[in-house]
Amino acid sequence: MSEPTKEELLARIAELEKQVGGQKTGSLDFRVSEKGGVSVYGLGRFPVTLYYEQWVRLLDSADGLRAFLEENKSKLKLKSERKAPSNHCHESSCNGFAFLMVFAALGLRRRPSVSFYSESPAQ
């Protein structure tokens, strides 16, 4: 098979730019993962993936999380306050931030049995 010509490459680039141009920047994208979970893309560098029951439980506690976020806003890092991103990401902290963003974006109902702590609970 021969190499594509310059015109073919330029046509392909234009086609790809049209595809990318149609995508909203900063929008959330929901997909079903290979293992049957629901992944949310667009919150951060990595998708947040949970199974159906986990999403329902998380969404049921949205009001509690929203109140928690407001009560602790002064302690939280806001995206506008962040410095240059680091090249490492501990899975728990990345997913935790992504969960906060999911709740903030969706503003859904609360499930009373869920607790939120501003610091790690005593163990």
Image (cartoon, rainbow, N blue to C red):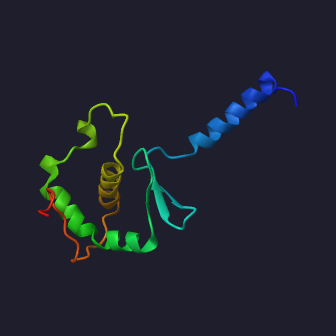
Where residue 90 appears, as percent x and y from the top left, is 34, 46
Q: Residue at x 19, y 64 (%)?
A: 116
Residue farthest to the front, as pictured: 123
Residue positioned 40% across, 46% down in the render: 44
Horizontal side of 96 relative to 7 (left or right) equals left
Quarter of the image containing the C terminus? bottom left
**Above-or-below relation of 114 to 29:** below
Q: Position of residue 77 (x, y in %)?
A: 21, 44
Q: Nearer the viewer, residue 95 or 106?
A: 95
Residue 78 in percent (x, y) is at 24, 44
Is residue 71 or residue 94 the one in the foreground?
Answer: 94
Report the front residue among 70 and 22: 70
Q: How many numbered marks, from 0 up?
A: 0
Residue 58 in percent (x, y) is at 33, 69
Asked if residue 41 shows in the view, the reply is: yes
Residue reaching furthest to the right: 1
Instruction: Quarter of the image for the N terminus: give it.
Output: top right
Q: Quadrant of residue 2?
A: top right
Res 28 visible: no
Please report the residue visible at 34 percent of the width from the left and 70 percent of the height from the top. 59
Apparent side of residue 28 relative to residue 97 in the rendered image (left or right): right
- In the figure, is residue 27 to the left or right of 33? left
Quarter where residue 33 is shown: bottom right
Q: Is residue 45 above or below residue 121?
A: above
Residue at 45% of width from left, 72% of height from top?
A: 52
Q: Would you say 63 lies left or right of 4 here?
A: left
Above/below status of 31 relative to 87: below
